[in-house]
Image: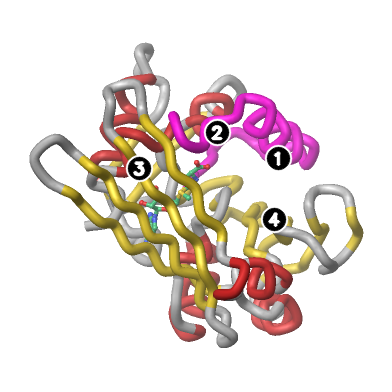
């Protein structure tokens, strides 16, 4: 299961308080109302900031990520649950739903994306807002095999890690982690998919009005960069 081991080291690898603030400022600038559902909440860094102004429910597929998030929520402000963002049947309706920081791209099939957007819409109230980000097309070239990203390091507990990112021309991004534990090496193989923003726009427009599309926060529209940021309103 992906994130079984990575969950324990996730914050060490990627936690960035400045970036979390940027995410939260972006979300709050659209004044979402009270009830907020965060999909694929990971270790809850954005979740707990949103909980300062919202009644937040949050889910993630990986038990260990949810446990890590819950451990930070000492005041039990958030309803954290383990669950699949493709099936929101156990949730009610919300004023806003968000899926942040490379989580949407774990949906690998176009049909899954279509169904996911419809599921999100079904759990939004009138005029509800939907926030998400998606890998930019330029990521495919950035991680193409001849210049794949590679990093190695050692965590505080002495565990060594190797992390490689590579892409295929079809738009799959492979993230491979190797954790060198004292008695064994554990590998995690993550696959994400890059979607053409024009296709995303076309599919989104069936159910949402797109209020904003920017690249890397500031560039209008889908352009060269790392991520596209979508803000949509339920039709
Ligand atoms: C890159 S992490 C981002 C976590 C978090 N959103 C953040 O901002 O740090 C991606 C997360 O997506 C979760 N995930 C992937 N597929 C999922 C699915 N189908 N349903 C719910 N969570 C999923 C993973 O378990 C992981 O925690």
CA distance for labels 4 and 3: 45 Å
Left/right placement of residue 64 relative to residue 46 reads left
Q: Which residues are magenta?
A: 12-38
Label 2 near ligand 1 (CB < 8 Å)? yes
- The residue beneath circle 4 is 127
- The residue beneath circle 3 is 161
Label 1 near ligand 1 (CB < 8 Å)? no
Say few, some or many: other residues with alpha carbon within 10 Å of mark 1 (under 14 / 14 to 19 / 20 or more): some
Residue appearing at x 32%, y 63% in the figure? 189
Q: Secondary structure at mark 2?
A: helix
Mark 2 against mark 3, which lies toward the viewer? Answer: 3
CA distance for labels 2 and 1: 10 Å
- The residue beneath circle 1 is 27
- Residue 183 x %, y %: 8, 40
Query: Between 78 and 226, which is closer to the camera in this rendering?
Result: 226
- Residue 72 x %, y %: 37, 20
Mark 4 against mark 3, which lies toward the viewer? Answer: 3
Q: Closer to the N terminus: mark 4 or mark 1?
A: 1
Q: Is residue 9 above or below residue 188?
A: above
């Amino acid at each position: 299961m992906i994130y079984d081991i990575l969950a324990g080291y996730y914050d060490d690898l990627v936690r960035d308080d400045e970036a979390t603030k940027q995410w939260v400022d972006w979300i709050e600038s659209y004044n979402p109302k009270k009830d907020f559902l965060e999909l694929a909440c990971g270790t809850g860094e954005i979740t707990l900031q949103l909980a300062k102004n919202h009644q937040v429910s949050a889910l993630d597929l990986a038990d260990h990520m949810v446990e890590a998030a819950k451990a930070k929520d000492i005041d039990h402000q958030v309803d954290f649950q383990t669950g699949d963002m493709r099936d929101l049947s156990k949730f009610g309706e919300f004023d806003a739903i968000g899926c942040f920081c490379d989580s949407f791209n774990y949906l690998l099939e176009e049909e899954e994306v279509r169904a996911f957007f419809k599921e999100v819409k079904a759990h939004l109230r009138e005029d509800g807002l939907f926030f998400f980000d998606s890998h930019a097309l330029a990521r495919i070239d950035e991680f193409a095999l001849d210049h794949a990203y590679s990093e190695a390091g050692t965590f505080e507990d002495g565990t060594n890690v190797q992390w490689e990112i590579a892409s295929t021309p079809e738009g799959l991004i492979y993230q491979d982690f190797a954790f060198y534990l004292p008695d064994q090496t554990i590998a995690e193989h993550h696959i994400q998919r890059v979607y053409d923003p024009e296709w995303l726009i076309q599919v989104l427009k069936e159910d949402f009005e797109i209020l904003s599309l920017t690249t890397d926060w500031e560039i209008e529209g889908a352009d060269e960069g790392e991520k596209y940021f979508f803000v949509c309103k339920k039709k």
